[in-house]
């Protein structure tokens, strides 16, 4: 079971680093829905791994990433309407 949670956490970490790398390279913008989705999915994956390997500070920062990403996606959705 540990390997499953570790794998989910590693995928989340790789996705988070990838999104930041793409942002820094100018391949994604901070208001690009792909960037926001990558951050949201990576934070959710990391929260899932934290359910097995608990760390309060990591959990709280991932919850903040989720909230910020959702807020950005809602803002984008409203701009398109």
Image (cartoon, rainbow, N blue to C red):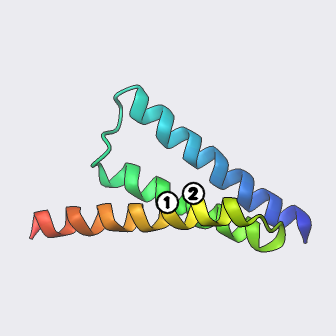
* SS state under label 1: helix
| Residue placed most toward the observer, 54 or 24 | 54
* Marks 2 and 1, how far apart at CA: 9 Å
Please tell me how crowded label 1 is: few (under 14), some (14-19), or many (20+) other residues with Cα within 10 Å: some
Give percent across and percent down for residue 74: 26, 69
Q: Is residue 17 left or right of residue 74?
A: right
Instruction: Decide if residue 57 is on the left or right side of residue 39.
Output: right
Q: Nearer the viewer, mark 2 or mark 1?
A: 1
Residue 34: where, in percent of width, then height? 37, 52
Mark 1 highlights which residue?
65
Among all residues in the image, which is located at the extreme left?
81
Indicate the position of residue 59 as horizontal and vertical percent values.
66, 66
SS of the residue under disc 2? helix
Sort mark 2 into few (<14), some (14-19) or many (20+) by Cα contacts within 10 Å: many
Q: Earlier in the sequence, mark 2 or mark 1?
A: 2
For residue 66, above or below residue 38: below
Percent of width and height locating residue 49: 75, 66
At a point 38% along the width and 68% down the height, the residue shown is 70
Instruction: Please report contact status of discs 2 and 1: CB closer than 8 Å, yes or no.
Output: yes
Relative vertical location of residue 65 with respect to residue 70 in this rendering, above or below: above
Quadrant containing the N terminus in the rendered view? bottom right
Q: Which residue is mark 2?
A: 42
Q: Quadrant of the C terminus?
A: bottom left
Residue 11 in the figure: left or right of residue 23: right
Residue located at (50% from left, 63% from top): 64
Q: Residue at position x 32%, y 66% from top?
A: 71
């Amino acid at each position: 079971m540990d390997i499953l949670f570790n794998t989910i956490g590693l995928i989340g970490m790789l996705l988070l680093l990838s999104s930041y790398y793409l942002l820094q390279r100018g391949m994604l913008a901070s208001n690009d829905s792909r960037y926001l989705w990558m951050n949201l999915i990576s934070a959710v994956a990391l929260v899932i791994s934290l359910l097995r390997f608990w760390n309060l500070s990591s959990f709280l920062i991932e919850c903040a990433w989720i909230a910020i990403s959702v807020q950005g996606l809602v803002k984008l959705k409203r701009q398109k309407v």
